[in-house]
Image (cartoon, grey):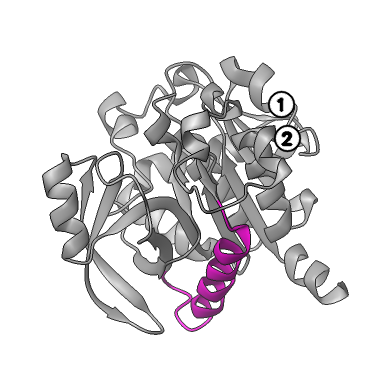
């Protein structure tokens, strides 16, 4: 137990919880893995599951949440334990990718060698242990290639035409696969072809060292990175929530802000395959 707590204390977990639909759970979703027996925690909703998942990966004091201020009444209760300084809040019109990048940069400025897991809150798995094992294995591989960022690609999804797919190259046992392209929600026939050819469902989970995230953000969006770092350093109340609004970033072209995506291929990374987790995206229930 002490070893697990020691490991968790050296990590940070960023949960992207900006969608108020995340607290709802559709009966259709529970049917996408009929052989699995959902744990009682499933009824708590996606955000509560995401919060529990985050505290399994990192110490509660190292859990950060990126959310929309307008949805505060939805996400604040599941993430009651997060300190104000660990809340990166977007005002209407500000993309959550901006606050997520800000969260990653804030970690990097304090501890570049900190391992980060960025978790979306829009999925459910029948077997959490399989997902946790996959994340732990990926973290282990990050020590071999600290300059890389990784994602998990699911290959046991039941929703062929309601997912985003990663087209990958040859898979290396230790280093995963290079992501060649991303196909967003293809029609059923193309989805089946992609699966046959070895494509993986994009999980949206990102893993890597803080310095690797910071290096990529600074390389591909240097102006945005400078603005984010400058605004966080100039805040008068360092213990307060971090706010992200369009008025605060007027010097950043709107087109550049909207084009920021922490996902492949815009954000280069490698993919590790995960099978047997019973992955279900919230997209299938059309919430």
User: In the rendered view, would you say 232 is above or below 172?
Assistant: above
Residue tagged 1: 76
* Res. 22 image quadrant: top right
Q: Is 9 in front, or is 194?
A: 194
Above or below for 217 versus 44: below
Would you place residue 23 above or below residue 193 in this image? Answer: above
Q: Is residue 60 above or below residue 8?
A: above
| Marking on residue 79 | 2
Residue, x 40% and y 21% (percent of image)? 250
Residue 154, position as x, y percentages in the image = 39, 59
Left or right position of 41 against 50: right
- So how many labels did they put on this image? 2
Determine if the magenta segment contains residue 88.
no
Q: Main secondary structure of the magenta part?
A: helix
Q: Nearer the viewer, residue 43 or 11?
A: 43
Outermost right residue: 2
Name the spot of residue 156 as percent of width and height, x first: 38, 59
Membership of 130 in magenta stretch = yes
Q: Quadrant of residue 56?
A: bottom right
Left or right of 65 in this view: 206: left
Measuring 62% from the left and 50% from the top, which residue is drawn there? 37
Distance from disc 1 to disc 2, alpha carbons, whole Å, reads 5 Å
Viewer-closest of 178 and 198: 198
What stretch of residues is rendered in magenta? 126-148
Q: Position of residue 258 (x, y in %)?
A: 31, 30
Q: Residues within 10 Å of mark 2 (few under 14, many from 20)?
A: many
Screen quadrant of the N terminus: bottom right
**The residue tagged with tag 2: helix, strand or loop?**
loop
């Amino acid at each position: 137990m002490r070893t697990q707590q020691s490991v968790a204390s050296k990590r940070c977990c960023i949960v992207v919880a900006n969608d108020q639909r995340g607290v709802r759970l559709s009966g259709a979703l529970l049917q996408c893995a009929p052989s699995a027996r959902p744990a009682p925690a499933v009824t708590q909703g996606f955000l509560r599951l995401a919060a529990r998942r985050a505290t399994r990966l990192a110490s509660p004091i190292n859990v950060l949440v990126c959310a929309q201020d307008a949805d505060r009444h939805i996400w604040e209760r599941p993430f009651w334990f997060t300190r104000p300084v660990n809340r990166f809040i977007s005002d209407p019109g500000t993309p959550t990718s901006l606050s997520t990048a800000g969260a990653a940069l804030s970690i990097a400025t304090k501890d570049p060698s900190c391992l980060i897991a960025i978790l979306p809150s829009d999925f459910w798995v029948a077997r959490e242990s399989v997902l946790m094992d996959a994340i732990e294995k990926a973290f282990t591989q990050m020590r071999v290639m600290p300059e890389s960022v990784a994602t998990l690609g699911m290959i046991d999804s039941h929703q062929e035409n309601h997912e985003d797919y990663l087209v990958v190259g040859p898979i290396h046992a230790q280093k995963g696969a290079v992501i060649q392209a991303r196909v967003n929600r293809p029609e059923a026939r193309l989805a089946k072809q992609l699966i046959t050819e070895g494509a993986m469902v994009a999980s949206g989970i990102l893993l890597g060292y803080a310095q690797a995230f910071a290096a990529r953000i600074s390389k591909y969006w240097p102006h945005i990175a400078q603005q984010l770092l400058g605004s966080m350093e100039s805040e008068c109340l360092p213990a307060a929530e971090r706010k992200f609004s369009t008025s605060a970033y007027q010097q950043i072209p709107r087109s550049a802000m909207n084009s920021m995506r922490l996902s492949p291929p815009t954000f280069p990374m490698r993919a590790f395959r995960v099978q047997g987790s019973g992955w279900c995206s919230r997209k299938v229930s059309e919430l």
